[in-house]
Amino acid sequence: MTQPRPIRFLHRGQPVQVPASRPTRTVLQWLREDARATGTKEGCAEGDCGACTVLVAELDEVPHTANPTRAVRAHGVLVRPVNACIRFLPTLDGKALLTVEDLAVGEALHPAQTALIEHHGTQCGFCTPGFVMTLAAIHERHALERASAPEPSRAALGDALAGNLCRCTGYRPILDAAQAMLTDATPRLPLAGVREQLLALHAQAQAEAPPIGHTDYHAPRSLAELAALRLARPDARLLAGGTDVGLWVTKQLRDIGELIWLGDVPELRHLGLNATGDALEIGAGVTLEDAWAVLVSHWPALADMARRFAGPPVRHAGTLVGNLANGSPIGDAAPVLMALDATLQLRRGEALRTLALADFYLGYMHNALQPGEFVQSVSVPLATAREVGWHVAAFKISKRQDCDISAVSAGLAVRVEAGTVREARLAFGGMAATVRRAAAAEAALVGQPWCEASALRAAAALPQDFTPMTDLRASHTHRQRVAGALLHKLWLTHPAAGAALGHPLASLATVTPA
Ligand SMILES: Cc1cc2nc3c(=O)[nH]c(=O)nc-3n(C[C@H](O)[C@H](O)[C@H](O)COP(=O)(O)OP(=O)(O)OC[C@H]3O[C@@H](n4cnc5c(N)ncnc54)[C@H](O)[C@@H]3O)c2cc1C
Ligand code: FES
Ligand code: FES
């Protein structure tokens, strides 16, 4: 058997080689235990606290117009904040890792570090390196885009820090520091020359076979290579952002067997309109952060859901397709995309087929993928954004505002013509073993006048669709009641012309992007 080649990436600005070992060893374990770079901390080991936030830079290979991104884009690389605790080390191959140790230039601290000190934004300091890294990414983006984008508001900074928890300082001084650091608007990340170093690593990797050396870890570099590999290894686990899979290792201590990493397949990163311009195509490698940003640009009513879906480091690593493929009954993207009538492009070898998302889930964590098949992309028709008469809403009910798992989530779309509901797609998560549409509630609505009584009748039909369970997040009764209340809220926030004016919730009818 061919000897595996080492993993190669940049750390502290220099190429490092790490002998191939257990592919689920995390970046955080390597940093703290092997590299002895202990500035990066471990709090939760599940992507929730942000103490382990690092920046990962990779080659920016897709033309800008073809791929809008919310990553920092500079010097020919893309930089994203991610959680080192759930990121598997081999996925760094060919990339650059930046940690809190990389920010100071000699004695001069990064503006984020200076501002945290000056504004008393740290006490025990355990969370501080994570905050510093997220702030450094925010600072860089602002410094690069300040000519074309306004300075982030305090609220926007709060959202951008939603993936970082502090348990002793409190967020007021941290937000003060975040605002203060923006007054120094010079790009500061050490990115000059990184592209050339990464190109050299890639050239070295190309010259070797196999492209990445592991018997139980594969990193295909093209769609064709991925399709062939998937066909040959139908039992291997696909790894996209690893924000679900990572926790199976760090929390459930599972042996997840052979892995196929999707992150190096450029074709999967496509994000844009389809050939006919009537649907949005989102490849299986597109991050949640980028996908939600484009979805919100077409459907502003999704802004709250996008903002409350995990925190930025998880959204910069995880993919939208990973969320759909994982098939959790409480996943937040599936109800929304079902309401928007999304379809999946499934690939098995050379064969492509299209399946409605609504038909994808067959049972609890069980989907319609055949052996050797994978999701190549998701396609979201733009009709509900462009045609007159559509009312679209997305609601997430959870105990915390930020970074929490939903008890119930809903994606709702109704088309009203001349005062009558012509179409309705009402999809719910947290109500059954899979995310699915509410057939009885939809039937109760279609053909009826768009009025409060119709919305309440649809809500009353929901028990025919769902018998939700009681668990630690919510009781059966709460889920039933809240799902009905969300249908009522759809009416209250999108009333028929002239109706329900003056109702307190009516002002929510126009939701603007954050
Ligand atoms: C702190 C934290 C907060 C979170 N908050 C939320 C939240 O608010 N709402 C929510 O819904 N989820 C949340 N999640 C869950 C997770 O982030 C999402 O489900 C994410 O979209 C998963 O994508 P991924 O790329 O990381 O998938 P991975 O973890 O890489 O994969 C997930 C599953 O999908 C499969 N898969 C991936 N890509 C494909 C493909 N192309 N074809 C076939 N199968 C594939 C994998 O084999 C695996 O079974 C959170 C997770 C964390 C850690
Ligand atoms: S240690 Fe908490 S997010 Fe990584
Ligand atoms: S300073 Fe102690 S947890 Fe934030």
Image (spheres, rainbow, N blue to C red):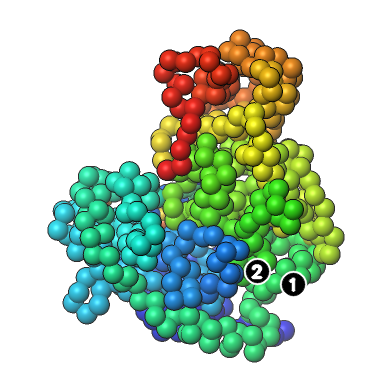
**Secondary element at image label 1:** helix
The quadrant in which residue 133 appears is: bottom left
**Secondary element at image label 2:** loop
Residue 9: % across, % down: 49, 79
Residue 333: % across, % down: 59, 42
Does 25 sit above or below residue 75?
Answer: above
Name the residue carrying label 2. 265
Q: Could you tell me the amino acid type at mark 1?
A: Glu
Count neighbours of disc 2 (C-alpha within 10 A) and say few if under 14, some if 14 to 19, many if 20 or more: some
Residue 81 is marked as none
The quadrant in which residue 269 appears is: bottom right
Residue closer to the observer: 178 or 13: 178
The numbered mark, 2 or 1, whose residue comes first in the sequence reads: 1
Residue 61: % across, % down: 57, 73
Q: Quadrant of the N terminus?
A: bottom right
Does 201 sit above or below residue 459?
Answer: below
Name the residue carrying label 1. 225
Ligand 1 within 8 angstroms of badge 1 C-beta: no
